[in-house]
Image: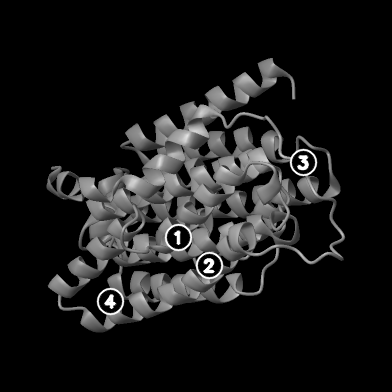
């Protein structure tokens, strides 16, 4: 892609996200979301591959429908209450429509159907943007309106997202689809705690984005997109594939690593709110995700391919690991000791 065009689209993404985050009026938030959608579409379809064009078309249709529903819910609220302020969403029907609209934007169950397909049709770096940066503005809107939202509906969607994200990821062989279902599962964790502790939702989102960025940077460096080619990638940069295993285990939420922190805090908060059954269900459903993270880690570092492999062996290259990947990987593994500071941040 032309560097000037890439700069324009990147600046437009920053502008759209900043507009949504700083908006008080629903029309400004809607305009920011539209700027974001129109900026990411050329980045999805830049390879001119039929899958990329299909992915950008699906993304456009879903995001346009979600934006329309969001605008309709805010107009309905303004019609009944006279309020256009984001934090003053009080009409019950508007709250339900807004929950549906934001769920479509984020890819929460039952509006998740578009997300794995769009990620599969995009390049790794565009997939990273879709899984992290593009989800930040809708998450902020969800947090701003959280006091008005229906907790029962959010809880059902969160548990369904965690269950389906883990269940559907079990049988995947494409790394981008595995990471898409991982994203859906983590969205469930963010949503379940939204009403009780919005700050914890943001902490979970930040740490999820950090770990996902480390994985996408790594698969971009070793240039593998399928489980079958991950098995031969260890010959390229052995140390990097070893760190990939630790990052995947961190994303699964195993204790000494960074990813354990948000799940620990969420289960603790749910228990404080006397939602022990919900906390138990979420903890058990996270085992589904742990299975496919372990499967991916096993393929990346522990398994050697059979001699009859259809993929050519790669020579170990002198390609240096770029600095962002190294920094993100270290943060994805070693942030747990900072948990007291994160917990006491106002």
* Mark number, residue 228: none
Label 3 sits on residue: 315
Q: Look at 40% across and 47% down and name the residue there.
A: 332
Give me the residue at 12% from left, 47% from top: 344
Q: Which residue is mark 2?
A: 294
The residue shown at (61%, 20%) is 8
Point out which mark residue 249 bears: 1
Residue 69 visible in the shown view: no
Label 2: few (<14), some (14–19) or many (≥20) C-alpha neighbours in 10 Å: some
| Most foreground residue, 77 or 101 | 101
Q: Nearer the viewer, residue 250 or 131?
A: 250
Asked whether the beta carbons under mark 1 and mark 2 sit within 8 Å of each other, the answer is yes
Q: Earlier in the sequence, mark 4 or mark 2?
A: 4
Q: Earlier in the sequence, mark 4 or mark 1?
A: 1
Of circles 4 and 1, the one toward us is: 1
How many tags in the picture? 4
Q: Does label 1 or label 2 sit earlier along the sequence?
A: 1
Q: Position of residue 277 (x, y in %)?
A: 26, 84
Q: Secondary structure at mark 4?
A: helix
Placement of 266 over or under 144, stated as above or below: below
Q: Which residue, given by chain and number where applicable, does mark 4 sit on?
A: 279
Residue displayed at 21% across by 78% down: 275
> In whole angstroms, how far apart are the C-alphas of marks 1 and 2?
7 Å
Q: What scheme was used to colour the molecule?
A: one colour
Give yes or no for contact between labels 3 and 4 (Cβ–Cβ under 8 Å): no
Mark 3 or mark 2, earlier in chain: 2
């Amino acid at each position: 892609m032309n560097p000037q065009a890439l700069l324009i689209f990147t600046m437009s993404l920053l502008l759209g996200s900043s507009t949504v985050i700083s908006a008080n009026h629903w029309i400004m938030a809607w305009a920011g979301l539209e700027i974001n959608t129109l900026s990411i579409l050329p980045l999805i379809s830049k390879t001119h591959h039929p899958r990329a064009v299909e992915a950008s078309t699906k993304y456009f249709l879903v995001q346009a429908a979600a934006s329309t529903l969001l605008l309709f819910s805010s107009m309905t609220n303004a019609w009944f209450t006279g309020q256009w302020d984001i934090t003053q969403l009080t009409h019950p029907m508007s709250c339900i429509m807004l929950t549906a609209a934001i769920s479509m934007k984020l890819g929460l169950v039952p509006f998740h159907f578009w997300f794995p397909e769009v990620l599969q049709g995009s390049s790794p770096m565009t997939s990273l943007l879709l899984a992290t940066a593009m989800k930040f503005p809708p998450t902020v809107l969800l947090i701003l309106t959280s006091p008005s939202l229906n907790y029962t509906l959010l809880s059902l969607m969160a548990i369904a997202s965690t269950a389906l994200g883990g269940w559907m990821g079990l049988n995947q062989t494409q790394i981008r689809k595995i990471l898409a279902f991982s994203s859906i599962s983590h969205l469930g964790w963010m949503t379940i705690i939204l009403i009780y502790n919005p700050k914890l939702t943001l902490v979970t989102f930040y740490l999820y984005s950090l770990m996902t960025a480390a994985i996408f940077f790594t698969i971009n460096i070793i240039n593998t997109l399928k489980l079958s080619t991950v098995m031969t990638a260890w010959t390229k940069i052995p140390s990097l594939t070893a760190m990939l295993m630790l990052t995947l285990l961190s994303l699964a939420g195993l204790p000494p690593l960074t990813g354990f922190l948000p799940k620990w805090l969420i289960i603790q908060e749910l228990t404080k709110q006397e939602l022990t059954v919900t906390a138990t269900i979420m903890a058990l459903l996270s085992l589904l995700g742990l299975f496919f993270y372990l499967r991916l880690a096993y393929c990346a570092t522990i398994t050697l391919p059979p001699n009859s492999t259809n993929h050519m062996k790669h020579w170990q290259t002198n390609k240096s690991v770029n600095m962002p990947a190294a920094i993100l990987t270290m943060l994805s593994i070693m942030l747990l000791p900072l948990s007291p500071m994160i917990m006491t941040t106002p």
